[in-house]
Image: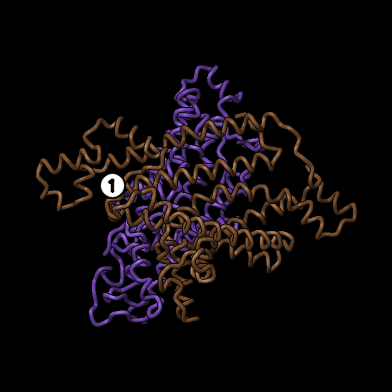
Chain colours: A brown, B purple
Amino acid sequence: MERGRGEVLPERPFVRRYLLQRLFAFLPILIGVSLLVFTAIRLIPGDVITATLGTEAGMLTDAQRESLRSYYGLDRPVVEQYARWAAGAITGDLGVSTRHGKPVTELIGDRFPVTLQLALMAVTLALLVGIPLGILAAVRHNTIFDLFVRMLALAGLVMPGFLVGTLIIYLLSTVFGVLPNAGNFVRFNEDPGLNLRQMIFPAITLGFAFSASVMRMTRSSMLEVLGDDYVRTARGKGLRERRVITQHALRNALIPVVTLVGVEMGYLLGGTFIIETLFSLPGLGRLLVNAISQRDYALVQGATLFIASVFVLINLLVDLVYAAVDPRISYDR
Amino acid sequence: MTVSAPPLEIVHAHRRQPGVLRRLLKNLSGTAGLLLVIFYVGVGVLGALGATPFPPNEQHARDRLQPPSAVYVMGTDLFGRDLASRVIAGAAHSLRVAVTSVTLAGLAGTLLGVTAGFAGGRVDSLLMRLMDVFFAFPALLLALVIVTVLGPGTENAIIAIAIVYTPIFARVARAPVLAVKQMEFVMAARCIGGSSIRVLLRHVMPNTLAPLIVQISLALSWSLLTEAGLSFLGLGAIPPMSSWGVMLNEHRALAENAPWLILYPGMAIALAVLGFNLLGDGLRDVLDPRLRGRK
């Protein structure tokens, strides 16, 4: 199981076959996702024009309505509508947002970096806090510290992001007299210092639940590994405890944590909707939530497809990393 | 992707596991979870029966934003509504959403999963690929898409949450079916002339029970969280409905001056979710030892 540092992985043909299989499974899922999103929007009662314009739609003449229908391509057969939309999506054309009057792709390109930064900061914080605390809790199993970590992990599990965020905002405003979301949002490339100050509390909020899962997982898999024979052997060889833990136990204990990162990415992306709304960050999640309440269907359709594709892609990447890290996985299904 | 699994604990027909409740009560987290869940359900039933100190939507114009006192145990909100009554009514609301959506998801998911696993072949791969598409969405995103189609509101939130968690139940129900359907006792049941339905119900289905029960408890906690999240975004329960998510959203701007307005609904959500989580963990330890330690 132990691999020396810098040693090249042996050629494993079945790994390559597995990777190819995963890549091929990726496409049908994307097509399925796009079909689902497309169908969902068509299931909205009434047509998109009435739904978008609301009561104003009653003032349209038949000719105006027809011309709008043909402008949005709604007079074509459904299959053709889907084909056009899917072909557009591949070339980066997701239509025009009715509320913003801008191409959906442009809006996504504008907002996605904020969400990505938020998610990356949250994951980084969660791992930086969760892994060390998880290891320490396992090493000091059944002590006060262990209990403290377990309570913290439980709190992260049961407190939804909007509650954590509301409490953080409350504490900041009453105890420290600062409002994290006051003033205009500044992007990282404009003023990195100010941007990080604006992003840190949303990231802590988003990362809190995640760090709780990381703690739980690190602690339990560390406990499992610490009882294994090879760890006893390492201790028996007379290695220092610190070296046994960092060099021997940790490597294997972290494998489940890698999977966890992938599994939890979905919660994290879902969490961005709420955190961005709570902290008024101009990210993709808030864009989508607003688009839903404003019934901006081209934007809902495009943003949903984009977020789901990113999510599928992340899962694929995690699977690939996982397959590379853990030689115990069986690749035949 | 499968990690080599430890051997299954097989449940045979006619062999009931004795005293699940007794074993659950020996388990610390199981007991704590059970007590919290009973408390939450009790409060929810009171709320559903209308047994609140004040009608939850009654406005006391003179008593706006009162801190907790003997009359208003949890204080009042901006409209002078009694927060304790609203939190109790919120328990009824969340309980109704959670139980209905998880029942729907559990029934649909189990049916799909067991059908897929038992039928095998094309039916299985078709159904499971369909489930994969649903899994391709982060849960809250899928719920949001469904709410977009159906419109906001409690009933629609229930449907959305049910659809989101159906694939999870399908996966949970399918795995044990696949595992036991090739086993000798199932073969034997077939050989002595048991019909497919009988074999399925008497011999295969009991093996899906343990993981499903654990899943139900966890799904109830997710369902609570999803409902609160949707309501918080203004896409679930519609004000003045007493939903914990709506309360937190309405009151968060007032938190600085009236912290009780977020404290009590927040605690309510956390305790209810904690209860179902602890109960789920306890049930897993008792019913499904091979899953111990996993999330």
- Residue A34 locus on image (x, y percent): 39, 38
Residue B11 quadrant: top right
Nearer to us in this view, B55 or A94: A94
Q: Is residue A115 above or below residue A83?
A: below
Nearer to us in this view, B202 or A201: A201
Say how many tags the image has.
Answer: 1
- Residue A285 locus on image (x, y percent): 41, 55
Query: At 11% from the left edge and 47% from the top edge, which residue is drawn?
Result: A60
Residue A316 quadrant: top right
Q: Quadrant of the C terminus of chain A?
A: top right
Q: Is residue B64 above or below residue A121?
A: below
Nearer to us in this view, B253 or A190: A190
On the image, numbered disc 1 is attached to which residue?
Answer: B150
**Tag 1: amino acid:** Leu
Q: Quadrant of the N terminus of chain A?
A: top right
Q: Is residue B293 left or right of residue B47?
A: right
Query: At 65% from the left edge and 38% from the top edge, which residue is drawn?
Result: B3
Subunit of label 1: B
Local SS, label 1? helix
Query: Does any portion of residue A73 appear in the rendered image?
Result: yes
Query: Does any portion of residue A201 appear in the rendered image?
Result: no
- Residue A158 locus on image (x, y percent): 50, 60
Q: Is residue A321 left or right of residue A174?
A: right
Q: Is residue B237 above or below residue A168?
A: above
Nearer to us in this view, B9 or A38: A38
Give neighbour class at mark 1: few <14, some 14-19, many 20+ (Cα, 10 Å): some
Q: Is residue A280 above or below residue B96?
A: below
- Residue B38 locus on image (x, y percent): 45, 59
